[in-house]
């Protein structure tokens, strides 16, 4: 069942607010997006910091649920289904952002990299 848009937006917003709390030492991008540096900080802190783990879970859950809702909407408009189901865990998120390194990590938005990787791994084709 697709997520209502307001619920999906609320989940992502909650993740953003919590992310800002945990990864305060790491800046968002100049446009206020969650940066690769912030996600790396959450991933690094999660094994030993329960709050960071909770924030990471909320962020990844919000990203995954939103991606699923968008795919449902695309499918309703005629896009073909994905070959496999969407998956996202901490290691997959780390792998997805691994290419953004150095100083660019504070200005590179993490969410598009993670979503793009999810779609690729699931074999999704949003355009013919």
Image (tube, helix red, strand yellow):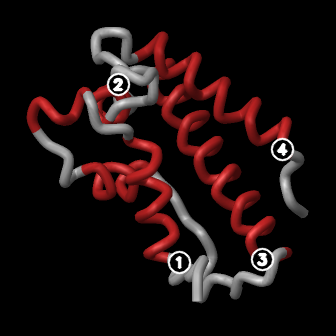
101 left or right of 44 in image: left
* Of the image marks 2 and 1, the number of the one nearer the N terminus: 2
* Of the image marks 2 and 4, the number of the one nearer the N terminus: 4
* Of the image marks 1 and 3, the number of the one nearer the N terminus: 3
Give neighbour class at mark 3: few <14, some 14-19, many 20+ (Cα, 10 Å): some
- Compared to residue 28, the image places residue 70 above or below, namely below
Circle 2/circle 4 CB separation < 8 Å = no
Q: Give SS at disc 3.
A: helix
Residue found 33% across the figure and 56% down from its top:
96
Q: Give SS at disc 4.
A: helix
Separation (CA) of disc 2 from disc 4: 24 Å
Give neighbour class at mark 1: few <14, some 14-19, many 20+ (Cα, 10 Å): some
- For label 2, the residue is 29
* Of the image marks 4 and 1, the number of the one nearer the N terminus: 4
Circle 3/circle 2 CB separation < 8 Å = no
Residue 48 place in picture, x, y as percent: 35, 25
- Compared to residue 75, the image places residue 65 above or below, namely above
Q: Give SS at disc 1.
A: loop
Give neighbour class at mark 2: few <14, some 14-19, many 20+ (Cα, 10 Å): some
Separation (CA) of disc 1 from disc 3: 14 Å
92 left or right of 8 in image: left
Residue 106 place in picture, x, y as percent: 24, 27
* Of the image marks 4 and 3, the number of the one nearer the N terminus: 4
Circle 2/circle 1 CB separation < 8 Å = no
What label does residue 122 carry, if any? 1
- For label 4, the residue is 5
Separation (CA) of disc 2 from disc 1: 28 Å
Separation (CA) of disc 3 from disc 2: 31 Å
């Amino acid at each position: 069942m697709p997520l209502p848009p307001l619920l999906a937006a609320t989940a992502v917003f909650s993740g953003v607010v919590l992310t800002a709390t945990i990864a305060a030492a790491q800046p968002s991008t100049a446009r206020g997006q969650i940066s690769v540096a912030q996600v790396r900080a959450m991933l690094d802190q999660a094994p030993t910091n329960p709050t960071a783990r909770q924030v990471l879970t909320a962020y990844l859950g919000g990203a995954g649920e939103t991606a699923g809702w968008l795919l449902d909407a695309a499918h309703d408009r005629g896009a073909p289904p994905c070959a496999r189901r969407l998956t996202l865990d901490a290691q997959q998120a780390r792998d997805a952002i691994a290419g953004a390194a150095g100083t660019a990590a504070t200005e590179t938005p993490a969410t598009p990299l993670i979503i793009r990787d999810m779609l690729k791994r699931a074999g999704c084709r949003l355009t013919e």
